[in-house]
Image (spheres, rainbow, N blue to C red):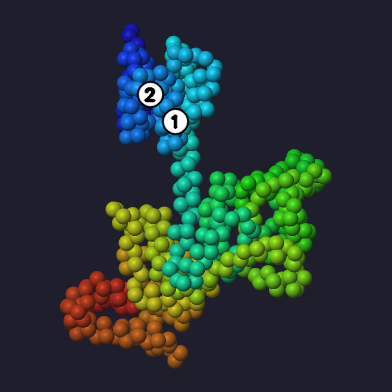
Amino acid sequence: MAEHFPPEVSVPESTRPRILVVDDEADIRESLEALLTLEDKYAVDMAANATEGIRKMESGTYDLVLLDLMMPDKSGMEVLDEIRPRDPETPIFMITAYGSVEVAVQALKRGANDYFSKPWDNEKLLIEIERMIAARRLESENTQLKRALKQRYSFPNIIGKSERIVKMLDLVAQVASSRSTILITGETGTGKELVAKAIHANSVRAEHMFVAVNSGSLPPELLESTLFGHVKGAFTSAIQSKKGYFEVADEGTIFFDEIGTIGPETQVKLLRVLQDKEFTPLGSTEPIRVDVRILAATNADLFQLVKDGRFREDLYYRLNVINIVLPPLRERKEDIPLLVDHFFDHFCRENNKFLDAASQRSTLRFEPEVIQVLMEHSWPGNVRELENVVERAVVLATGASVPIDVLPDPLLQANGIRLNRGEGGALPPDASLFEICNDFERRVILERLEQYNWSQTEAAESLHVPLSTLNQKIKRLDIRIRKKSDAG
């Protein structure tokens, strides 16, 4: 019985790595082309001399270049000298009939990545080509990933156009590239960690670790072990040595959230790291040197903690080299509509609902009266509270126009708003302006519906509003529609 083997799958040419062969000898070019195209893994381009090779390198994108050393118009060394200043990244393998060590060393110094003598070993050449292209593609993917992470935590993700936020962002841009320790202050929910990540992502340390430490969530003994690590046997449960955050974040950034909550002993050790750039793991006698940038945040008055004797004054001044103050949301209310749109986009993508297919932007919008309530709210939870409100709206929304009844009850109550009183209920003596306006609107709509025998279409026409708008108001105001037969 004949054996059947699956057909070999050919890699589409558009996705194959592109290789340029630059050699003045036709038989060499043909030999390399046959070798490289044998397994349908590479797309191969040819240049018959140095001048043509330079032109093709400048006009096209190649994953690797095979370059002959000796050509009539220019040598491979001259090509390297001309190309490398403009293109330091593309791998170039030098191929030559002159196999001296001196020539190889010179080629590598001038920018070649590898060197092969004629006649070359086909298997070795193919292995080195595949290895080099794979390494370059992995490096490119890592660069793109880092760029994506940097973009994720870049300044555009700190939303706002108010004067307070613009000034704050200007300061962040100035200090990001420095080595200075930074203290970020602001109320809970103002986005202190987001600012810390933006500083790290736009610093020279961006390619190294960013480690966030929630200082208030760990007991003192566990916090010290977490920060500085420990050696085996340092305490009862230390069955093996463990690196601390400072060692893990070497050459990177550590962000202390709520720095004011750390205990006196940890404050002493943290001061030593700031002063001497070294620390000693628990149970060890050998100090470890590190290069870590410290960013700290607090919603407390750190200077008042110093006055109260709960925070070291010397540590305070070490941390407070540069102070970035994040304004509360109630002091930059003009940013609320921008933040609402930003969060609508984010949560609609996350929940895959109410998205415009072309732009991938949210189609949801709060009704005008909702925006009015949001603008009047004091926002004790700041941006985080607003984010939660918008996420709730996205989850509960049944149409593109989001009514006021999706707002959480505590927010409504904080602004004197009571909904769903039911028909016929009298306004309370302490009714808010919002409730008075709603009550008046409700009575007008009820009167007009009764006038037109509960025909919503005719009522909408008489009120000069779209039927969809009237239906939304009927739903929001909890108006019960009677059947025409019952109305008569």
Image quadrant holding the N terminus, namely top left
Please give the label number shown on residue 418. Answer: none
From the viewer's perspective, is 340 left or right of 211?
left
Residue 32 in percent (x, y) is at 37, 17
Mark identifier at residue 81? 1
Q: Which comes sooner in the sequence, label 2 or label 1?
A: 2
- Residue 416 image position (x, y, % from top left): 46, 82
Identity of the residue drawn at 61% across and 52% down: 253
**Picture layout, residue 359 above or below residue 433:** above
The kind of residue on which mark 2 rests is Lys
Amino acid bearing label 1: Asp
| Residue 413 seen from this side | no
Helix, strand or loop for disc 2: loop
Q: Nearer the viewer, residue 382 or 127?
A: 127
Judge by depth and name the residue closer to the eye, 135 or 475: 135
- In screen coordinates, is 225 left or right of 171? right
Quadrant of residue 5 in the image? top left
